[in-house]
Image: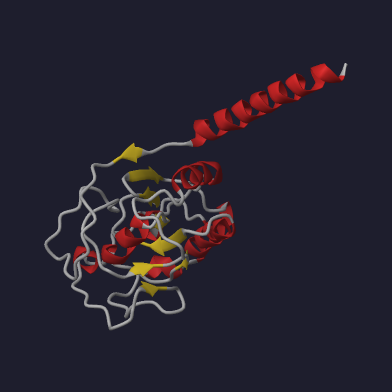
Amino acid sequence: MKKFLWPTIIIAAVIGAWFWFSRGSENLHFDTIADQGADHVNDIAGVNYNSNPPTSGPHFPVWAKRGAYTQVLSDGYLIHSLEHGYVVISYNCDRLSAGRFIPAVFAHEGEDIATSSASPDLYHLTFTPPAGMSWLTPENPPDKVVDLPERFASAPCQALVDQLTPLLNSYQRLIIVPRPELDVAIALTAWGKIDKMDSFDEARIKAFASSFHNAGPEKTTE
């Protein structure tokens, strides 16, 4: 009867793989964005990106490394990270409202969505890196150029960050960063790919990250 054992195991493995792939596919949502190139420049002030957040295009020679950042980062750094295969989770706490994904204890019924006071120019900076500088980290961020709106310091916002941060344990190339100019609560970006959502969906975020993690056009070892 042993000669029938291996075919049975193989069939079971195939069925199991199909089952898990199907479950992951159900949670995968994204739009493909036209590639705007990958030029390294020191000035992105005149660049018009074709999505918010952008998923490709001219960017700084310095990139942001893995971690949860507490200040806004220019697109010039983040696009370079995408080129290296990072997935970026951007969030906008000005878009948090009652009944979306914050626990009820934090919800304020009838609360209006605030309008961001950050300038779009923040993402279109001119930057000349110091000699020998290649990357940023949360412990060594760039100079702050704008204060985040008050809601980013609120309990609901911290609750969202607390939901997002554990995802860093699952992916080596993952960035979590506030983005006041975002038109939804959460946006996921990889090179040429984007998914936007109004609520925290762990399965959906993991499906996106697992599909596009470390899949950028420039293969690097970090």
Looking at this rendering, what residue extends furthest in the front direction? 3
Q: Left or right of 209: which side holds 92? A: left
**Percent x, y for residue 1?**
88, 16
Q: Say which of 209 and 149 sits in front.
A: 209
Q: Say which of 83 and 27 sits in front.
A: 83
**Percent x, y for residue 86?**
42, 56
Q: Left or right of 125: which side holds 217? A: right
Residue drawn at the location 38% of the way across and 45% of the way down: 196
- The number of numbered discs placed on residues in the rendered structure image is 0
Q: Left or right of 219: which side holds 170? A: right
Residue drawn at the location 81% of the way across and 21% of the way down: 5
Q: Confirm whether residue 180 shows in the render.
A: no
Q: Confirm whether residue 46 shows in the render.
A: yes
Q: Say which of 79 and 29 sits in front.
A: 79
Looking at this rendering, what residue extends furthest in the right direction? 1
Q: Quadrant of residue 129?
A: bottom left
Q: Left or right of 5: which side holds 124? A: left
Residue drawn at the location 70% of the way across and 24% of the way down: 10
**Percent x, y for residue 72?**
34, 68
Is residue 221 shown above or below 197?
Answer: below
Q: Say which of 30 and 97 sits in front.
A: 30
Looking at this rendering, what residue extends furthest in the bottom direction? 131
| Colour logic | secondary structure
**Percent x, y for residue 9?**
75, 25
